[in-house]
């Protein structure tokens, strides 16, 4: 048989080669994952926030992600988040221009914190009333009227981002925030059309995606960050989350899904892995709850050992079930791991803590460096989000 008759699998893409994501082109396949910057105490874009993303863009990523933009005031998970209103458009445009000047694309993560917002003193909206360990109180079940309003809020926020010249929006469907809470049997006890069966529990996140896509059309790429597993008994797990991903793929509103895990409400360390920074987080908490967090923080911040690409075994289930582009995230510290992700069919890889430690890591790798990221997964960066997220091992 002639060698030309043999069927060979196509070569995996080069992580440094160009990529297409919906209507946009990226210079490479590295994305700065959304890591809340903690720099917007006045809820407006400022020089520090622009510099944060300019630094990452100059460091070589294909796209950086502005993190945790609340679509409504009642959806803020921290007291220093951006709230997406038309008044933010000039500042967002300035940030987009700065990132574009460095050759990278920019995305904004849209979210509603749901029950997590109770930790900021807000009522905390959730599918059903639940106890919030962040606020030491029960949350409020969201009304159908407000739920439909939040769908509209996501669409309005997406329009603000698109009007500001961003290249993409990322809809946050994970981490214990409101859309993820609706997907969870543990948190969603509703008996109306928004609860019960998986199809009903997925109704709200699917409505959000559809509304965002209708709002922005093909002006920007539309991504979603979806939990594969919540990391708690009775929460969302692979059997159901794969089915939700299939629904989202069939709906046709998304250009890619970033696959994540864990819950800011119930089990944050299931996402982060590595050391649990209980003492540092207690010190950063409001004074009223510091003593309780020091005493009981380890019951909330469970410690999981760090392993390279620790979410890859879960993500493989989605790669096998879906044909749409997928983004791998979770402890990617080596270039070889990024190449492995490409080999296994993932279109993009997202780096978070590694780029807090070394914003220019992608440039170094492309220049021939072979070192592993210097991030040691101490997770002490988690406690800096109230005064400017940073790696505590370097001055930036």
Image (tube, rainbow, N blue to C red):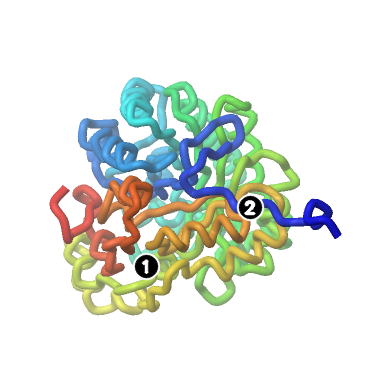
Residue located 42% across and 61% down the image: 332
Nearer to us: label 2 or label 1 = 2
Residue 210 image offset from top left, x and y in percent: 65, 37
Task: Calculate the distance from the C-alpha at mark 2 to the C-alpha at mark 1.
Answer: 48 Å
- Seen in the picture, residue 363 relative to 184 is either above or below; the reply is above
Quadrant position of the N terminus in the picture:
bottom right
Residue located 43% across and 39% down the image: 63
Residue 46 image offset from top left, x and y in percent: 23, 31
Residue receiving disc 2: 11
In which quarter of the view is residue 66 placed? Answer: top left
Residue located 60% across and 53% down the image: 12
- 191 or 175: nearer the viewer: 175
Residue 203 is labelled as none
Q: Is any part of residue 206 visible from this angle?
A: yes
Q: Is any part of residue 87 visible from this angle?
A: no
Residue receiving disc 1: 133
- Seen in the picture, residue 328 relative to 316 is either above or below; the reply is above
């Amino acid at each position: 048989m002639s060698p030309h008759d043999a069927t060979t699998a196509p070569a995996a893409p080069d992580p440094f080669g160009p990529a297409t994501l919906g209507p946009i082109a990226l210079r490479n396949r590295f994305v700065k994952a959304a890591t809340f910057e903690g720099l917007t105490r006045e809820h407006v874009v400022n020089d520090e926030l622009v510099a944060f993303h300019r630094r990452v863009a100059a460091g070589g990523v294909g796209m950086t992600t502005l993190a945790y933009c609340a679509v409504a005031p009642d959806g803020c998970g921290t007291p220093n988040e951006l709230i997406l209103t038309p008044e933010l458009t000039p500042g967002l445009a300035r940030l987009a221009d700065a990132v574009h000047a460095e050759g990278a694309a920019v995305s904004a993560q849209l979210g509603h914190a749901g029950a997590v917002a109770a930790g900021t003193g807000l009522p905390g909206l959730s599918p059903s009333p639940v106890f919030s360990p962040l606020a030491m109180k029960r949350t409020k079940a969201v009304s159908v009227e407000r739920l439909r309003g939040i769908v509209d809020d996501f669409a309005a926020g997406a329009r603000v981002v698109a009007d500001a010249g961003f290249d993409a929006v990322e809809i946050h469907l994970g981490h214990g925030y409101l859309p993820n809470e609706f997907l969870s049997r543990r948190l969603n006890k509703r008996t109306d059309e928004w609860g019960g069966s998986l199809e009903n529990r997925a109704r709200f996140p699917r409505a959000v995606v559809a509304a965002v896509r209708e709002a922005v059309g093909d002006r920007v790429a539309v991504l979603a960050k979806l939990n594969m597993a919540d990391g708690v008994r009775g929460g969302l797990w692979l059997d159901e989350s794969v089915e939700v991903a299939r629904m989202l793929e069939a709906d046709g509103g998304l250009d890619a899904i970033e696959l994540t895990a864990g819950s800011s409400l119930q089990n944050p360390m299931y996402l982060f892995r590595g050391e649990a920074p209980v003492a540092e987080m207690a010190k950063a908490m409001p004074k009223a709850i510091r003593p309780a967090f020091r005493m009981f923080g380890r019951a909330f911040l469970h410690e999981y050992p760090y392993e390279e690409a620790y979410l890859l075994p879960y993500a493989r289930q989605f790669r096998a079930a879906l044909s749409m582009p997928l983004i791998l995230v979770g402890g990617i510290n080596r270039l070889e791991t990024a190449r492995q992700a490409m080999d296994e069919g993932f279109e993009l890889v997202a780096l978070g803590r590694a780029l807090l430690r070394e914003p220019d890591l992608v440039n170094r790798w492309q220049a021939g460096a072979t070192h592993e990221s210097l991030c040691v997964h101490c997770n002490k960066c988690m406690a800096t989000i109230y005064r400017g997220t940073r790696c505590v091992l370097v001055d930036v």
